Image: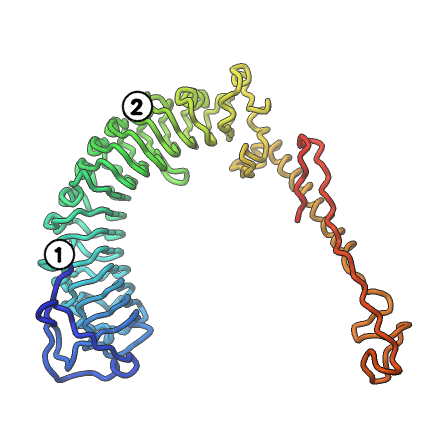
């Protein structure tokens, strides 16, 4: 995509690069002079070098046509100063307007043609963006917290953006302007727009199967279909969150590879068969969220027929999930996290780990339907996969203990912070208390040793200097002069050595780490 040319130099379209001091030139308003190509007349078209914060640098910007850095207009900017930007045509950096309660339209920017990144945020009274009718290029567009009902069409030369973020626009219902864009849209985020139901105008900008996309559709209760995503093959990130009207994932039938997939808050989805073509998820595959809702309609993982590799598989808050069957080709999971699935028995997790055969990372489970009938948490690591069948049947972990007796450190040496309360697990609480007492014992020992090994003054010395016998030198003569005794050399104090930590009798010969 080429940047638009505009009047100025007849061959290149570049503007004259006149620079000025904002403290002098800007405060002098131009009321007469030659007319500019757009906006009120000015004697010259001026270029502002660097970043311009209208709130921090008030003045008259009537003749500014180009800002070579970022332009920021926030709550501190005076509406009168904002109105003086009527000749602005280009912003080389970010163009941000936010928290301007008195701004009813963007008519002050009717000449704007080029910005690198545009953010319009926090103005629910702003429903009219027609003032941007000359904008021909913006790589990134963010419209957040506005009163708009439709996506603006921008200028006649506008062919699309590289990033589009639409957040917290409660009145937004129409994305029809995107149907006229001719370039792809690699990054799309639409969040918290409760009135938006039709995503079909985005089919063109998301329709290149060779493009690497990142798509997030979050909290859109009126959306009922994902057909707009049918051309996705390889995605960097796919987040489908809070879509209670979606009943199936058939719109994802073409998806084969992804770096990240997150699905939660889709209660009507009862099968993952729409992801039958998905082969690899390099980073994270999440079904449900540990702090939010899950996939309450799922009873198993049936439908993931082609999935062979997952970096991290997280399954949380799936109320109806009873089995992890349905991934016949899955051969490797780096890390598995199964949390708060009340109908999922621990035996089902064991069967899944056994079927996969290669789960080197931690396997965490906290469920109300544990195999031993107790609610709580059990922690298993990759080495637990080598436990004997008799130990598993007895409910023992790798060290031959019940799950509540798990050591406070995992196989990698990292401390495990348990989510359960002391009342639910008194033995774990006792081990935590023992660890605390031992640590405080070492801390007290370190304090005692630091005092015992501190430096003591050499006898016969004082801060002001002394002569032999401890008597002060009152002769007024410096050391080494006639009639004055030779100064006593300072004794070299040995540096105290830190004691070696004792061995821990229960740590298989390892030394306990001292508190320092």
Q: Quadrant of the N terminus?
A: bottom left
Q: Nearer the viewer, residue 301 or 455?
A: 455
Residue 17 location in percent, x, y? Answer: 20, 74
Secondary structure of the residue carrying tag 2 is loop
The residue labelled by disc 1 is 158
Q: Nearer the viewer, residue 412 or 346?
A: 412
Label 1 environment density (alpha carbons within 10 Å; few <14, some 14–19, many ≥20): many
Q: How is the image coloured?
A: rainbow
The Cα–Cα distance between marks 1 and 2, rounded to whole angstroms, is 44 Å
Secondary structure of the residue carrying tag 1 is loop
Position of 354 compared to 500: left or right? left
For the question of whether residue 176 can be seen, the reply is no
Q: How many marks?
A: 2
Q: Nearer the viewer, mark 1 or mark 2?
A: 1
Whether label 1 touches label 2, CB < 8 Å: no
- Residue at the spot x=49%, y=23% of the render? 385
Residue 19 location in percent, x, y? Answer: 24, 77
- Residue at the spot x=13%, y=45% of the render? 201
Residue 490 location in percent, x, y? Answer: 80, 67
For the question of whether residue 69 can be seen, the reply is yes
Label 2 environment density (alpha carbons within 10 Å; few <14, some 14–19, many ≥20): some
- Residue at the spot x=18%, y=35% of the render? 230
The residue labelled by disc 2 is 302
- The mark found on residue 88 in the picture is none
Position of 73 compared to 349: left or right? left
Which image quadrant is residue 70 in?
bottom left
């Amino acid at each position: 995509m080429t940047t638009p040319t505009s009047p100025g130099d007849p061959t290149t379209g570049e503007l004259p690069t006149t620079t000025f001091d904002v403290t002098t030139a800007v405060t002098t308003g131009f009321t007469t002079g030659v007319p500019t190509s757009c906006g009120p007349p000015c004697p010259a078209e001026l270029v502002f070098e660097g970043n311009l914060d209208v709130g921090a640098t008030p003045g008259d910007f009537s003749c500014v046509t180009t800002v070579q850095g970022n332009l920021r207009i926030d709550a501190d900017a005076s509406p009168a100063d904002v109105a003086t930007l009527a000749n602005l045509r280009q912003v080389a950096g970010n163009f941000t307007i936010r928290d301007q309660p008195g701004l009813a339209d963007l008519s002050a920017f009717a000449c704007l043609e080029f910005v690198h990144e545009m953010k319009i945020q926090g103005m629910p009274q702003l429903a009219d963006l027609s003032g941007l009718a000359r904008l021909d290029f913006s790589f990134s567009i963010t419209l957040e917290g506005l009163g708009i009902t439709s996506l603006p069409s921008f200028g006649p030369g506008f062919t699309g953006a590289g990033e589009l973020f639409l957040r917290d626009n409660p009145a937004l219902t129409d994305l029809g302007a995107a149907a006229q864009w001719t370039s792809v849209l690699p990054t799309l985020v639409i969040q918290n727009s409760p009135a938006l139901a039709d995503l079909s105008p985005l089919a063109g900008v998301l329709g290149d199967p060779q493009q690497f996309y990142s798509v997030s559709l979050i909290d859109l209760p009126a959306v009922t279909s994902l057909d707009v995503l049918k051309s996705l093959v390889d995605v960097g990130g796919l987040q489908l969150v809070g879509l209670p009207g979606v009943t199936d994932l058939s719109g994802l039938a073409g998806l084969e590879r992804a770096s990240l997939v997150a699905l939660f808050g889709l209660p009507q989805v009862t099968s993952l068969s729409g992801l039958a073509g998905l082969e690899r998820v390099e980073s994270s595959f999440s079904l449900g969220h540990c702090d939010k809702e899950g996939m309450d309609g799922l009873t198993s993982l049936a439908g993931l027929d082609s999935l062979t590799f997952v970096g991290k598989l997280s399954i949380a808050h799936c109320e109806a999930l009873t089995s992890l069957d349905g991934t016949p080709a899955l051969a490797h999971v780096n890390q598995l996290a199964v949390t708060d699935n009340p109908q999922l028995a621990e035996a089902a997790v064991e069967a899944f780990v056994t079927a996969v055969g290669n789960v080197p990372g931690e396997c965490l489970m906290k469920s109300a339907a544990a195999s031993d009938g107790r609610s709580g948490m059990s922690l298993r690591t990759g080495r637990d996969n080598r436990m004997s069948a008799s130990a598993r049947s007895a409910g023992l972990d790798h060290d031959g203990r019940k799950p509540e007796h798990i050591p406070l450190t995992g196989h990698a040496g990292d401390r495990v912070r348990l989510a359960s309360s002391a009342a639910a697990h008194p033995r774990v609480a006792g081990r935590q208390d023992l660890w605390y007492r031992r640590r405080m014992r070492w801390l007290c020992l370190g304090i005692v040793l630091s005092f015992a090994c501190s430096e003591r003054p050499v006898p016969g010395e004082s801060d002001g200097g002394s002569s032999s016998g401890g008597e002060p030198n009152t002769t007024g003569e410096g050391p080494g002069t006639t009639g004055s005794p030779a100064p006593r050399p300072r004794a070299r104090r040995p540096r105290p050595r830190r004691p070696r930590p004792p061995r821990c009798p229960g740590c298989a010969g390892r030394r306990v780490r001292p508190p320092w």
